[in-house]
Amino acid sequence: GLLARYTDMAGPMRGLFSQDGRVFCVGGDTLYELQGDDTADTLGSVAIDDQPVSMASNGHGGHQLLIISAGFGYIFDLVSGAFGIITDASFPANAVMCDFLDGYFLVLQASTSSFFLSALFDGTTWDATDVGQVSSSSDTLQAIRVLQRNVWLLGSARSEVWVNTGATFPFQPIPGSLIEYGLAAIWSVAEADGSICFLGQNEAGGRMVLQNQGYGFKRISTHAVERELGTWLDLPN
């Protein structure tokens, strides 16, 4: 059977993050740290909607945990325990997803083709000019994911891969990395065996489960699964 643990938290569970033996989760509108004795410390409150949260850490260089929830950003200091909403006016409105690479938090802005960078190792400080803009396709970005020091930008119909080139705005698209597949469900992106997998679709709307192979994608779903996916009128985000 199964053993119930951490039963005194708010729900639903909207996100989980672990690093260096510490585990954090957001249940309902509350950020918790899970302890080994089946207790959960309450760390603070976040805005709530019907979507998952996104979390990332800037490691020992910044000792910060970034939480994106209901369009807002929050920072928990992993050393001092301080917690609060990001008040910098240059933090993107309607933030939806985050990740971390090379000292920067990367935050995707909903319903646009833009992502924003924090200051180096400081998620409380943002500059309105530190914005990456996808221009090789016209669809909106749906998800951002860092894998093996590459930034995967997944759109609704196409995707591309960016890398840190050391330019004034450090991240630039890798030439030839535009991929003719996008996301059919925003929160379907997962990592497995050092690769990215997700529920994808092409411009014609055909749905399939995809896994990256280099800077492209290979189909890993069966025809039977794809026929079933094609019957779904509404896909979960």
Image (spheres, rainbow, N blue to C red):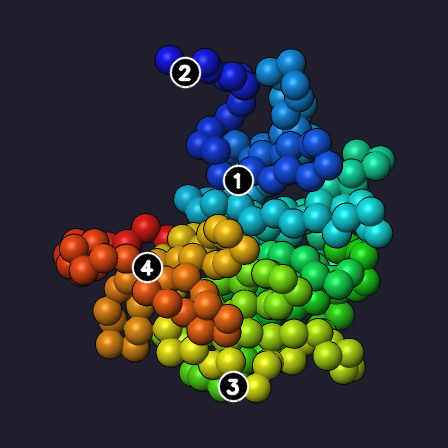
**Residue type (three-letter) at the residue carrying disc 2:** Leu
**Residue type (three-letter) at the residue carrying disc 4:** Ile
Query: Of the residues under marks 2 and 4, which one precedes in the sequence?
Result: 2
Q: Is residue 181 left or right of residue 86?
A: left
Cα–Cα span, label 2 and label 3: 48 Å
What residue did someone put label 3 on? 176
Q: Is residue 58 left or right of residue 199?
A: right
What residue did someone put label 1 on? 15
What residue did someone put label 4 on? 220
At mark 2, the secondary structure is loop
Query: Of the residues under marks 3 and 1, which one precedes in the sequence?
Result: 1
Query: Of the residues under marks 1 and 2, which one precedes in the sequence?
Result: 2
Position of the N terminus, as image quadrant, is top left
Give the residue drawn at x 55%, y 74%.
Answer: 161
Quadrant position of residue 100: bottom right
Q: Residues within 10 Å of mark 1 (few under 14, many from 20)?
A: some
* Image position, residue 44 (x, y; %): 67, 33
Query: Of the residues under marks 2 and 3, which one precedes in the sequence?
Result: 2
Give the residue drawn at x 60%, y 56%.
Answer: 98
Picture disc at residue 2: 2
Quadrant position of residue 76: top right
Give the residue drawn at x 63%, y 34%.
Answer: 24
Cα–Cα span, label 1 and label 4: 26 Å
Give the residue drawn at x 79%, y 34%.
Answer: 81
Q: Residues within 10 Å of mark 4 (few under 14, many from 20)?
A: few
Q: Are marks 2 and 4 in contact (CB under 8 Å)?
A: no
* Image position, residue 201 (x, y; %): 31, 68
At mark 3, the secondary structure is loop
User: Which mark is nearer the camera, 3 or 1?
Assistant: 3
Note whether residue 155 is visible.
no
